[in-house]
Amino acid sequence: MQVPTTDIPPDGDQLLYTPQEAAKIVRMSKHWLVTQANKEEIPHHRLGRYYRFSREDLIAIKDMYAKPARRSRQST
C-alpha cells in the first residue's frame, strides 16, 4: 500500500533532516524516531553521533507503519 507523501517535501528541497524536523514530517515524536533509529528499526543516516533522515528514509518510515483503512460495517 502506498502512503500519500504530501507531507514530505519534494526532492531537492533539503538533503537531510534532523530528528526534530523529521518527526514533524512523519507525525511521530522525536524521541520515538531516535529510539527506533538507535535500535536499527527504521532507515536513517548517522553522521558521527547525530541521526539524520533523508526524504527516502521518511517515505520508507511512513510506508513501514501505514495501516490500511478499516472498512465500516454497513447496517442492513
Image: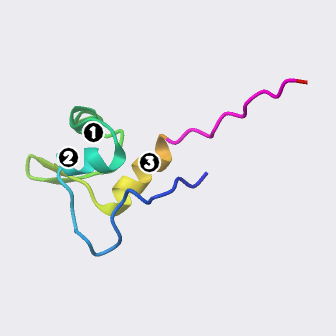
Distance between the alpha carbons at the discs numbered 1 and 3: 12 Å
Disc 1 and disc 2 in contact, CB within 8 angstroms: yes
Give the side of residue 36 with respect to residue 47, left or right.
Answer: right
Residue range of the region highlighted in magenta in the rendering: 66-75
**Quick one: 66 or 57, which is closer to the camera?**
66
Residue at the limit of the structure toward the right, as seen here: 76
Q: Residues within 10 Å of mark 3 (few under 14, many from 20)?
A: many
Distance between the alpha carbons at the discs numbered 2 and 3: 15 Å
Mark 3 secondary-structure assignment? helix
Whether 3 is drawn above or below 39: the answer is below
Give the side of residue 65 with respect to residue 46, left or right.
Answer: right
Report the residue at 52% width, 42% height from top: 66
**Quick one: 64 or 69, which is closer to the camera?**
69
- Mark 1 vs mark 2: which is more N-terminal? 2
Our reading of the magenta stretch's main secondary structure is: loop
Whether 38 is drawn above or below 24: the answer is above
- Mark 2 vs mark 3: which is more N-terminal? 2
Q: Residues within 10 Å of mark 2 (few under 14, many from 20)?
A: many
- Mark 1 vs mark 3: which is more N-terminal? 1
Report the residue at 22% width, 68% height from top: 15
Residue at the limit of the structure toward the bottom, as seen here: 12
- Image x and y of residue 71, in percent: 72, 34
Quadrant of image for the C terminus:
top right
Residue pointed to by mark 3: 62
Residue 70 is one of the magenta-drawn residues: yes
Residue pointed to by mark 1: 33
Mark 1: amino acid: Leu
Mark 3: amino acid: Lys
